[in-house]
Image (spheres, rainbow, N blue to C red):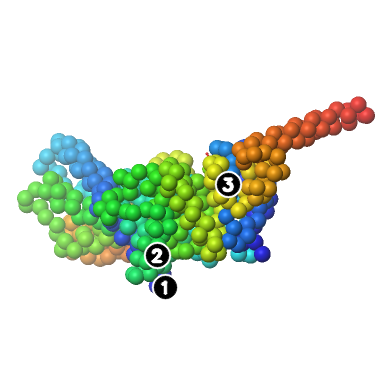
Amino acid sequence: MDGLAWRQFKAILRKDIVMELRTREMVTSMGLYAILTMVVYQVALSEAGASLDVRLVMPGLIWVAFIFMSLLGLNRSFVHEKDQGCIEALLLAPIDRPVIFFSKFTGNLLFLLVVEVLSLPVFSFLFLQEQQGIANPVWMVGLVLLGASIGISGVGTLLATISVNTSGRDIMLAVLFVPLMYPLLRAAVGATFAAVIGGPASAALFWGWMAWVAAFDVIMLLVAFALYEFVIGA
Amino acid sequence: MPVLVARDIVQRFGKQEVLHGVSLGVEKGEVLGLLGPSGAGKTTFVNILAGVAEPVSGTVDAFGERMPSLELMRRMGYMAQSDALYYDLTAAENLQFFGAIYGLTGAALKRAGERALDTARLTVDPRKFVRDYSGGMRRRLSLATAILHEPELLILDEPTIGLDPLHRVDIWESFSRMAENGTTIVVTTHVMDEAERCDRLAMIRDGVFIAIGSPRELRERAGAATLEDAFLHFARAETAQADREQATEHAAPEAGGRDA
Ligand SMILES: Nc1ncnc2c1ncn2[C@@H]1O[C@H](COP(=O)(O)OP(=O)(O)OP(=O)(O)O)[C@@H](O)[C@H]1O
Ligand SMILES: [Mg+2]
């Protein structure tokens, strides 16, 4: 990136962070969704009682919550751009389209991570009994979180851009989001499971799934980089 | 050589043709007004000039090069009919943001911001969010963001809507001053006294230019005392001609039928 692109990147990211700190629009809506999902899970699992080792289903439940939460939140990420026609002003500026993508993506990633990191302790508090814990070091869970969130916010940012220009906004994002996320979701659940359950083979399993996560992220970012010019102008 | 040339611009939304092949050239340092009633296609046309929208057919050249082009856009400023401001930021933050996007930093950005606000006749409250500004203040801030990077070609879509007469006059004086310094300005309006201040006017109705010329020329050609009357004159002439054309179109196939 040359100097101008870097300054433009920082300007957009900074603006998004300042606005999010003021309105808390995305973080609140995503946080609320995470909390509501946990309440529903609590009810759903209420009959399973002590016979169920929650750790077996927890990785899946977490990612289901996070996927739907980001679906909700990321869709809002272009609302301020669209509302007063700022997106047109941005597009008229001498700014390379991938710079817009990477700055919006970075902001979305940050907001997503904030909500995830805040909701995980609540999640473990609600569902893990006293004798249970995470078998492997916590940083492994952190790594899955980071890796998968990169993929989620990348795809989310791309689709949110497309849906700004399409009349069926939310539907568009929802319809494409889950199928596109499927491989990442599978790998994230696998890696989280390996980290939580532990056991002798868990390290190998964990890194195996993480390789999938990383591959997904790289491909997604390359595709976004290549397509963004086309997507944002559509 | 004209700074801006639009040739045979046609624009359609669905089945509705909004611009029917309009052409226009704008000279350097000229203030060109686009005057026409609501729905005439002014916004549609300036969006194409600015490169926000692509026409169905026709071309736009700016500074002798084909639009749209990112390089050319650096030399252009565009103020949309919507304000294109972030409502949850203060005025200064909006200016900083758009300045940074155009590569301005530090002292240069600060100076540019002050100059732009001065041109737009706006004093800003450092704590107030744009959401809490009046419509007229937003309009002026929007103008300030459009001229921040000192564009050579400025395209303004109803810049003075919602402004009181005093600010309106002030801002038009700013336009004249900018034009004297070599800035080319295309501005839409449906206010006649603003139209009077333009070097040249393109009167637009239902997606066609019904007359182009200096305000004085247009009044003289129409034999009218005011631009308003001149507009009505050209509008009627256009309608009459369209009727005649339609009549001949209808007549032709009938004649053919009888021959067969
Ligand atoms: N995105 C769009 N989709 C469909 N129709 C549109 C669109 N934009 C404009 N139109 C139509 O094109 C015509 C011209 O609109 P335009 O906004 O260019 O008028 P205008 O001269 O700018 O009017 P005003 O003075 O009210 O701003 C109108 O009939 C409008 O309904
Ligand atoms: Mg308009």
Q: Are marks 3 and 1 on the same chain?
A: no
Give above or below for B38 relative to B90: above
Number of the front mark, 2 or 3: 3
Q: Which chain hosts label 3?
A: B
Residue A81, disc:
none
Q: Can the viewer see residue A47?
A: yes
Q: Which one is in front, B260 or B172?
A: B172
Q: Helix or strand or loop: what does disc 3 sit on?
A: loop
Q: Helix or strand or loop: what does disc 1 sit on?
A: loop
Q: Amino acid at mark 3?
A: Glu
> Residue, x 11% and y 48% (percent of image)?
A125
| Residue A170 place in picture, x, y as percent | 39, 42
| Residue B195 place in picture, x, y as percent | 57, 46
**Cα distance, mark 2 to mark 1?**
23 Å
Q: Label 1: few (<14), some or many (≥20) within 10 Å?
A: few
In the drawing, does residue B124 fall left or right of residue A2? left
Number of the front mark, 2 or 1: 2
**Cα distance, mark 3 to mark 1?**
46 Å
Q: Which chain hosts label 1?
A: A
**Cα distance, mark 2 to mark 3?**
30 Å
In the drawing, does residue B258 fall left or right of residue A99? right
Residue under numbered circle 1: A2
In the drawing, does residue A203 fall left or right of residue B27? left
| Residue B43 place in picture, x, y as percent | 54, 45
Q: Amino acid at mark 1?
A: Asp
In terms of image quadrants, where is residue B241?
A: top right
Q: Amino acid at mark 2?
A: Ala
